[in-house]
């Protein structure tokens, strides 16, 4: 049985990282493969969305460095909401520097990301040193943490293609105890799924740029439908403005959740 036909719960039994285990189990038990990307600067709005839409989510994706008036109280409230509604937190930091620098960015500064975010992501441009630096901080924290690699991107003209994607997959295999998956572009996620290997159950593919109607926007962001993304091999759809920009964000989240979950059930047969 290959990865495409296995349930999230079956894959959780074979995952090597405890965060991957927790996430796959959560997805299977809660019956959701929906992540919300909250790209908003207002702390109160982020918390409100986390509280109202949290019951529909497996992941909440943050951009902590755009939060205005950031303080530790915000993190405390967000972490409490994650526990209340049973979702994990994914800080979309997109680390892209040498190992020594990302160690300080991940573990220090005003945000202290390693203290509260279950997972972060990184570009592979600096080479494997970036993974080693982040892993060192995660291990020193004593907390269960994981890394997502940016193997593909959903914006037109991006350079994360072909050989770049292949190298991301090779690095993930080398550090499979820390790297739990990839960001994959909706239009090319089928190729990424093939590259990870049909028996690589531990690798989770997450896809942004998902919209019920597909299409694109004025800033060259390309959108793919939830059904197409999951059918192609992605495990989690990441939706932002398509949900919280709707007249009824909760109802919209429920619809995205149902469509993506139905596509997953159809995929696994």
Image: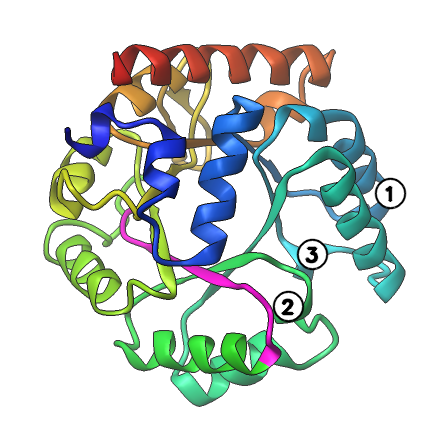
Q: Please name whichever residue, 246 or 138, is drawn nearer the observer in this view of the structure.
A: 138
Which residue corresponds to mark 1?
Answer: 44
Q: Nearer the viewer, mark 2 or mark 3?
A: 2
* Snapshot quadrant of residue 175: bottom left
Q: Secondary structure at mark 3?
A: helix
Q: Which residues are magenta?
A: 141-155
The disc placed on residue 66 is: 3
Q: Position of residue 168 (x, y in %)?
A: 22, 60
Residue 21 disc label: none
The residue under label 2 is: 113
Q: Earlier in the sequence, mark 2 or mark 3?
A: 3
Label 1 secondary element: helix
Viewer-nearest residue: 18 or 110: 18
**Which image quarter: residue 250?**
top right
Picture coordinates of residue 83, whole percent (x, y)? 74, 43
Disc 2 versus disc 1: nearer the observer: 2
């Amino acid at each position: 049985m290959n990865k495409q036909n296995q349930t999230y719960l079956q894959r959780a039994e074979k995952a090597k990282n405890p965060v991957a285990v927790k996430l796959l189990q959560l997805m299977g038990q809660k019956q959701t493969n929906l992540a919300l990307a909250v790209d908003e600067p207002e702390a109160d709005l982020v918390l409100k969305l986390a509280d109202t839409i949290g019951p529909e989510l497996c992941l909440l994706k943050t951009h902590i460095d755009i939060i205005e008036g950031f303080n530790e109280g915000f993190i405390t409230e967000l972490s409490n909401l994650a526990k209340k509604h049973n979702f994990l937190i994914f800080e979309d930091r997109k680390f892209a520097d040498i190992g020594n620098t990302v160690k300080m960015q991940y573990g220090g500064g005003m945000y202290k990301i390693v203290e509260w975010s279950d997972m972060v992501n990184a570009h592979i441009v600096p080479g494997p040193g970036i993974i080693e630096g982040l892993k060192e901080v995660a291990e020193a924290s004593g907390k269960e943490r994981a890394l997502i690699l940016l193997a593909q991107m959903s914006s037109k003209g991006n350079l994360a293609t072909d050989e770049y994607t292949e190298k991301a997959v090779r690095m993930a295999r080398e550090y499979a105890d820390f790297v739990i998956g990839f960001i994959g572009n909706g239009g090319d996620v089928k190729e990424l799924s093939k590259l990870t290997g049909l028996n690589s159950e531990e690798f989770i593919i997450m896809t942004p740029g998902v919209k019920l109607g597909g299409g694109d926007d004025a800033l060259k962001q390309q959108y793919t439908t939830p059904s197409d993304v999951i059918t192609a091999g992605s495990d989690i759809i990441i939706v932002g403005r398509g949900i919280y920009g709707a007249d009824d964000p909760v109802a919209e989240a429920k619809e995205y959740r149902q469509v993506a979950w139905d596509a997953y059930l159809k995929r696994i047969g």
